[in-house]
Amino acid sequence: MSLDIRSSELKSPIDVAEYLFRRLHEVGVRGVHGVPGDYNLVALDYVEKAGLNWVGNCNELNAGYAADGYARVKGIAAIVTTFGVGELSAINALAGAYSEYVPVVHIVGTPSTLSQKSGMLLHHTLGNGNFEVFADMSRNVSCATAKLNDPHDAATLIDHAIRECLAQSRPVYITLPTDMVEKKIEGERLKTPIDLKHPTNDPQKEDYVVDVILKSLHAAKNPIILVDACAQRHKVLAEVHELIEKSQLPTFVSPMGKGAVNETLPTYGGVYAGDGSNRGVRERVEASDLVLTIGSVKSDFNTAGFTYRVSQLSTIDFHSTYIRVRYSEYPGVRMHGVLRKVIDRMGKLNVEPGPAPTNEISKEDGEMAQGQVITHDWLWPRVGQWMQPEDIVITETGTANFGIWETKFPKDVLALSQVLWGSIGYSVGACQGAALAAKETGNRRTILFVGDGSFELTAQEVSTMIRHDLKPIIFVIVNEGYTIERYIHGMDASYNDIQTWKYKDLVSVFGADPEKSKTYTVKTKQEAEDLFRDSNFAAAKHLQFVELYMPKKDAPKALKLTAEANAELNAKE
């Protein structure tokens, strides 16, 4: 849906809600996620007027996950909830977006300003007259808050919130009282786009930091590059790839950075996660005398239980708000400008570029790959052979998040996961949001790998996918429960078990047209091979749902190693 804003329209005052949604359209939002509620209903009348589409999710938590997935593809997302009951249902998802640097605009329809000032005993409140309590909860998981309580400053607050959302790559929280929705504000302001330019570094300070980095880089004998999630979130991938190609240094990614680097490059080496890494990867990274980390997030799962063995004395960290060279930190120096100058001034390095390490399959792994039972050691490398350039692949917290480390991506694959926040069920909602964003931007294949236990938390979003004629390929790994939890604690405990569903039957239950959907049951390697070689399946012309059966206690090696490392860490505390 296009948006035609005529100059004559903007000379007249426009309603606050229209201004808000038009600004969202301006920055790239096209689908608005959320759930209707009586405090946001009138505001929702403005969604289509602003050239946007209302998604309408099954619940607010799923809507938050979907907005997260949408934002990771499109660059920003919006979710609308109602006061109290709606916003609190979404806050887990918004906290995850905050944790993982995902820009989402959260709009909350609230009671009128008069009702709030009077402390009226309204539904969806705690009954104590406190209308600030929910905003206070969200303040800690938002990088900016805008309370649109006065039409005189509403436009300024909206513009500031959206700017901060994109600049900091984190959620913002906007309240829209019912009596402010139709208040008039200046429309002329929409003629001037929101200023989204990054602030530039102080030139002298930036040049000094660049000189320090180049001195270390030219002195190094075997430096490497390690790319992490914030390189994606803060939009420096163009500079990262230019640095990789110009330097020809061996390059690795963290689990959260999976997909950030073109894995077809000859210098790409794989995923480094401390003890969870492939042996060749671990040895190569840890033998380096200089590691350039870009956008690093050193969380427990991202480092396989804090088992990085790279000294800060041999590390240069590039971040969105500072640079750290060994133990010297330079605050206020953004990596955007620094990377640009490092590339331009780097010259020839005193190193011999060599091939990156290749994955080695041990004898034990080879034996496990035999037979017809589908194992993780067999599945994930095979998935890499089936994937196509520009695929979007979403993996759930659990076996899929760890298994995907062993999948080599074709060029321009976008990987979505929630390694840091790790809320089970995230991936199903995120798949809906990502598939919608893919539909808006050219119908890239959207592929989901989710365990049966996680799927049961958010299965309703398959209904939303059907409603909007989205065409993801969904693999539900049927392995009788929470495998990741079994490896953390309670391998045979009943609390890690689930009720097994007839998962693929849900496609029909949710009302899918049999002509626009297809389901499969895969229990052997041969059946999986047949599916991967099916050109109709690969074409992804409609929604496809696969029950993929795997042994209850089988898990990727990286998950086993990470669980062991976390167990040792917990034992020491």
Image (cartoon, rainbow, N blue to C red):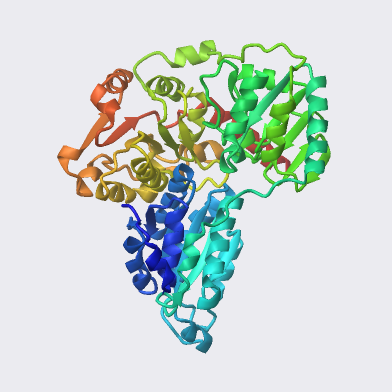
Residue 152 picture location, percent across and down:
54, 77
Q: How many labels does the image show?
A: 0
Asked if 340 appears above or below 498 in the picture, the reply is: above
Residue 545 picture location, percent across and down:
28, 36
Instruction: Note whether residue 265 is visible.
Output: yes
Residue 106 picture location, percent across and down:
48, 61
Residue at (63%, 48%) from the top-left corner?
198
Residue at (51%, 56%) from the top-left corner?
193
Instruction: Note whether residue 249 is visible.
Output: no
Residue 120 picture location, percent across and down:
47, 87
Q: Is residue 443 left or right of residue 408?
A: left
Q: In which quarter of the image is residue 501?
A: top left
Q: Is residue 156 left or right of residue 477?
A: right
Q: In this view, does 436 lie to the left or right of 534?
A: right
Residue at (42%, 30%) from the top-left corner?
390
Q: In this view, does 252 lie to the left or right of 7?
A: right
Quadrant for the C terminus in the image = top right
Residue at (64%, 41%) from the top-left corner?
299
